Image (spheres, rainbow, N blue to C red):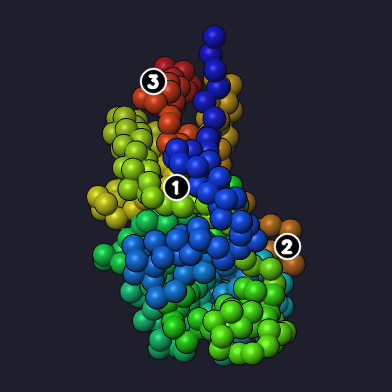
Amino acid sequence: MNSRIPFNRPFVAGKELFYIAQAITFGNLGGNGHFTNQCARLLEERFKIPKVLLVPSCTAALEMAAILFDLKPGDEVLLPSFTFVSTASCLVRLGVRPVFVDIRPDTLNIDENLLEQAITNRTRAIFPVHYAGLGCNMTRIMQIAENFGLRVAEDAAQAVNSYQNGRALGSIGHLGCYSFHETKNVICGEGGALCINDPALIERAEIIRDKGTNRKQFFRGQVDKYTWVDNGSSYVPSELSMAFLYAQLEMVDTINARRRTIYQYYEHALIPLAEEGWLRLPLACEHGETNSHLFYILLKDQVTRNALMDHLNGHGINAVFHYVPLHSSPMGQTYGYAPRDLPVTEEISGRLLRLPLYYDINEVDQAKVVEQISAFFKKANP
Ligand SMILES: *Cc1c(COP(=O)(O)O)cnc(C)c1O
């Protein structure tokens, strides 16, 4: 009996239910309770971030970033098109124009060499995305931001526990955004964090997170009334989710180590096919720098990618493509973009295939994946 190999399976670290039971005993389920504080402290200390605010999703963190940067209708923000919709929707909902910049063919991250030519007198910020947990060139991006007076919010949704030159991704821009969605490395179902690296933004961030009220200052005794003072929304996560998350954050090293082993198995086993020219492997990354969030291969063209994807799915292996580039989506086209405007993004997204990668996939299943990829090429070209 052959069982399917899923693309992802949520990982349970072990102490989640215990901590949730504790949270119930403590009696504060709404938010900002014991486990929310524990998660924030752990992230701040481990990743050297001045202030971390836990939020219900990375999307919420990105929305807060756009509000905190005071982005207004008509402003422009630079971002990749090769990303999840939230990187752009957090801007569009404020009337900001997303300006899509092409990616580098080697890292699949925003091409820092194309940023300056995309800057106009309306440009206010850059939202770089660390695809697959591999860092954008943050040194160059922060330099450009400083030269042009721009703000930077890292979409580090996939990059929790990834590093660049010894610094955690998410801790380098003025703001950083993490995701703990069940498809990421460290999870709590739905969850996220806003990393505040510019201390000047902390006070207003706390207000925006709490429905635009100064509740936090009230509880600290800094003001004698708790009232509506600013823009905001319901960006405080449930204490139950944070209890689950804390159990995962305690295991972050174990999770990273396991994912690295899985990643390196694919990397190693697929070398012969790469050398024969059937596929391209991801850029080799510095040991210990990335979090092995996802493993992709690049095929010759879109027709081959789709045929291989069908072949694998026909053999019980759930391999999937990734983004439909935002600039060529129906929404992207309303901003006047045509598919060929970003040639690298268009080309890469059509050739990319992600392989199953989750904490408890075993070597037998990984071997099946590799064997079927190999069988596909050998059958098509005996
Ligand atoms: C997953 C992801 C998001 C959204 O995260 P949520 O926590 O689901 O809101 C945003 N950006 C990127 C690059 C992602 O991979």
Give the residue pinned by disc 1: 248
In what element is the residue under mark 2?
A: helix
Residue 52: x and y, percent?
A: 47, 69
Measured Cα–Cα span from mark 1 to mark 3? 26 Å
Measured Cα–Cα span from mark 2 to mark 3? 42 Å
Image quarter of the C terminus: top left
Front residue of 365 and 340? 365
Give the amino acid type for the residue marked by disc 3 in the picture: Val
Q: How many marks?
A: 3
Name the residue located 68 percent from the left edge and 80 percent from the top edge.
212
Give the residue pinned by disc 2: 331
| Viewer can see residue 157 | no
Residue 284: x and y, percent?
A: 29, 48
In what element is the residue under mark 1?
A: helix
Residue 119: x and y, percent?
A: 52, 82
Give the amino acid type for the residue marked by disc 2 in the picture: Met
Give the residue pinned by disc 3: 364
**Mark 2 crowd level (few <14, some 14–19, many ≥20, 10 Å Cα):** few
Image quarter of the N terminus: top right
Residue 190: x and y, percent?
A: 60, 52
Task: Choose the circle earlier in sequence order: 1 or 2.
Answer: 1
User: Would residue 85 be found to the left or right of residue 356 on screen?
Assistant: right
Asked whether the beta carbons under mark 1 and mark 2 sit within 8 Å of each other, the answer is: no
Give the amino acid type for the residue marked by disc 1 in the picture: Gln
**Mark 3 crowd level (few <14, some 14–19, many ≥20, 10 Å Cα):** few
User: Would residue 298 be found to the left or right of residue 211 on screen?
Assistant: left
Name the residue located 71 percent from the left edge and 85 percent from the top edge.
227
Note whether 377 is above or below 38 in the view shown.
above
Disc 2 vs disc 3: which is toward the camera? Answer: 3
